[in-house]
Image: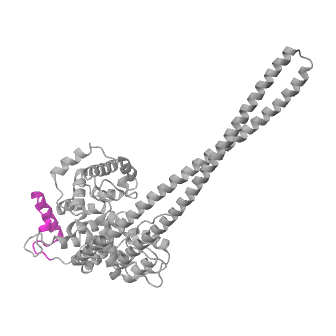
Amino acid sequence: MSYVGSFLKKKNSYFDTDEEFWEAFLKEYKKDAQLDVNSLSTDGSNKFGDLLDRVQRGVPAEHRGEIWLSISDSLDAHLDVLYWQLLNEHCPYERAINQDLGRTFPEIPMFKTPEIRKQLYNIMKAYSVYDSEVGYCQGLSFIAGLFLMQNMKEELAFTIFVRLMESYNLRTLFTPKMPGLMLLIYQFNAIFQTYIPALYFHFYRYNLSPMMYASQWFLTLFSYSFNVDLVFRIVDLILVEGPISVLLRFSLVILKRYEDDLLGIEKFDSLMDFLKSEKFTYVDDVEEMIKEVIDLKKVVSDNRLEQLKLEHLEDIKKREPAQREMEQLRETLKLLRKENKEQTNKIAEDKKIQQALTDEIVLLKQLVKELQEDNEAVKMQVKDLRTILSQEEMIKEDDRLISLQEELQFLKDKLRATQVELCQSRMQYNELETAYQLEQERWKKSKRRLSRKIQQSEDKSKRTSLMIDPPSTPATPTSMKPIELPSIAE
């Protein structure tokens, strides 16, 4: 039996070897599937009381799947049955899940096979129906994929996935507004500042916030970027210690290891590139890193995490009034923009009407001119005809001339009426133009008042955030806000 690591001293006297411990542990769990391993004593009164120490020393790779199921208490017959029922339900995320299958562990051959892709699709579909508040997002498929790598049946992978999301409270990282992720980032930022201050302020100087790099680590349990043998050990510890402390300690250890390299980089893009590079994300001395993570328990203590949690909740309460005021200002600005747009559209429509009337007048003038020319030609013809036509014919021609003159008079009357209408339209346009100018002045005054209110609100928010965030250093070109509100476009 091979083990991932064995550098910690054994404390339990019931078993001479780790192999004996894990064989007995699995045998006991199979006999009593309801065994609560998280309540086992650690004072030696229980033969499995040193479970944490055993996990820290290393889990046997060939039995990792069974051990994960046992530690997390994931053998749930109800969920097994429910899983297959959920697959028959409608899922609004089917297209998104299918699109992400090829992006999940693309470098690992097993995830290119139709069988594994189908299993991963089923797990994601079933969970999105099971927990409609979370639904689906890409990071979830990386977590579920870790369980399929342990050769679990898909229904068992689903049950341990549900247990991790619910009992270990990972779902708060994915629910709307991601409250769990926001808390985790807050705790990370605070401990990062005290544990590696030089690197913290270096990142601060270049506006590199934890949301830009650490959020991806937390949402995928490091599996998106780091090698899976390290990720397996992370999950080992998460199942016995809980996710928060483990995720924070791994993050700090990794950054501490490459502190000198990162301090030597003086561009934002270059820092981001290094954090994604293979040098940073591939850990070959996994066991040494695990030892460093365990040693960091004193820095990331439960008391410190609870204190930071309370501070974060208090910070949220302080920010709520400013955020509500900001939302109200945004709504007011939205209404004013809508009103201004309507006025602008109305003036544009009036201009179109005026232009159409002007074009019609030009056309009528041209038509009158042509008729006048035709009339003159007719007059000449009549004059010539009068000399050769009989009296009767001359009378007919006179009648025709009178008709033409009447038509000409009608057109002249129409032209005068159109000119009067144009004059009235111009007067209406001038009135609208004046009203528009007045409206513009009112809009500008409202906008200035709103800008002052927004500026006051943002200043208030900055003063509140400065109570938590450190003051900017002299070399800081810009400030980084712990929680940055979207800017309002003018």
Q: From the top left corner, tell me how far across and down residue 378 is, in percent.
A: 84, 27
Compared with residue 456, is residue 74 higher up or lower down, i.e. above or below? above
Is residue 26 a member of the stretch shown in magenta?
A: yes
Q: Residue at x 29, y 71 (%)?
A: 317
What is the span of residues highlighted in magenta in the rendered image?
11-39
Q: Residue at x 77, y 28 (%)?
A: 405
Q: Residue at x 63, y 46 (%)?
A: 424
> Total of numbered circles in the picture?
0
Decide if residue 10 is on the left or right side of residue 416. left
201 and 462: which is toward the camera: 462
Q: From the top left corner, tell me how far across and down residue 219 is, in percent.
A: 33, 63
Farthest-out residue, bottom: 474
Compared with residue 218, is residue 473 higher up or lower down, i.e. above or below? below
* Residue 226 shows up from this direction: no
Q: From the top left corner, tell me how far across and down residue 273 is, in percent.
A: 47, 70
* Residue 63 shows up from this direction: yes
63 and 172: which is toward the camera: 172
Decide if residue 303 is on the left or right side of residue 348. left
Decide if residue 429 is on the left or right side of residue 228. right
Compared with residue 486, is residue 338 higher up or lower down, i.e. above or below? above
Residue 357 found in image quarter: top right
465 and 285: which is toward the camera: 465
Is residue 273 a member of the stretch shown in magenta?
A: no
Q: From the top left corner, tell me how far across and down residue 453 is, in percent.
A: 42, 70
Residue 190 found in image quarter: bottom left
Q: Residue at x 50, y 66 (%)?
A: 445
In which quadrant is the N terminus drawn?
Answer: bottom left
